[in-house]
Amino acid sequence: MEETEAQALERWRMVDSQLRSRDITDRRVLATMGQVPRHRFVRPVDQPQAYADAPLPIGHRQTISQPYIVALMTQLVAPRPEDTVLEIGTGSGYQAAVLAALARRVISVERIPELAAQARRVLSELGIMNVEIIEGDGTHGHAAEAPYAGIVVTAGAPRLPDPLRDQLADGGRLVLPVGSRDGQMLERWTRRGGEVHRERIAPVAFVPLIGDQGWSEEAAGREGWSFGG
């Protein structure tokens, strides 16, 4: 599917107005955000808003994060060309596509089969071949290919899941939102030897991380989480 000149222009306007004008300074991240077609990862009805500074519903009570948050998390995890990065929560596949342009390989875990299938289809159509999507409980990570130089979690957790901490390589960076419906903080954890060090970055709002090491669906409902459409 060919993109229109208007879509390409909207994407570069998004980079200038939403990213470059804020605290996204990594040139590789800015260039990648200007190349990955976000409109391909949203529902047809939402394509006119694909480059707006807002999350959008993708079905199954999930969302695609706003472009700034995708860029910020990517900048924080700082993937290098030789890295393998683990993503928890494939969703639309957009964050995986951005990471894939910067890293050697991306392994992405998605608990909702329909979203996993849709993301695989879009990534394949775009010729992005270095993303592997695995269906399962992302709170367990993917130990078979650990350790990872970078881990990105795209849903709000009550705490850092132990399996993800254990799968982080020495010198690796893990980025995730921690908190409840009433408030989450985007955190970056960096492993140095046997210890992991936490930085608190910014307040954010994500859908809940569902799984054994996250929220149960019942607990998330009791917390009053706001889900995407």
Image (tube, rainbow, N blue to C red):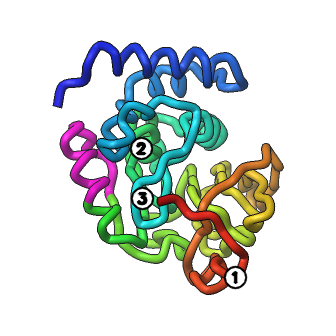
**Residue found at x 54% / y 44%:** 55
Res. 49 image quadrant: top left
Task: Determine if residue 119 is in view.
Answer: yes
**Mark 1, mark 3: which one is toward the viewer?**
1
**Residue found at x 41% / y 54%:** 58
Structural distance between the alpha carbons of marks 1 and 2: 29 Å
Residue 35 on the magenta segment = no
Structural distance between the alpha carbons of marks 1 and 3: 28 Å
- Residue 86 at what x, y percent from top left? 49, 56
Residue 122 on the magenta segment = yes
Which region of the structure is painted magenta?
118-132
Task: Determine if residue 104 is in view.
Answer: no
**Residue found at x 52% / y 59%:** 228
Disc with the residue nearer the chain's start (1 vs 3): 3
Structural distance between the alpha carbons of marks 2 and 3: 11 Å
Disc with the residue nearer the chain's start (2 vs 3): 2
Question: Which kind of residue does numbered mark 3 sit on?
Answer: Ser
**Residue holding disc 3:** 108
Disc with the residue nearer the chain's start (1 vs 2): 2
**Which numbered marker is on residue 137?**
none
**Residue holding disc 1:** 222
Question: Which kind of residue does numbered mark 1 sit on?
Answer: Arg
**Residue holding disc 2:** 94
- Residue 92 at what x, y percent from top left? 39, 52
- Residue 158 at what x, y percent from top left? 73, 72
Query: Looking at this rendering, what residue extends furthest in the front direction?
Result: 45
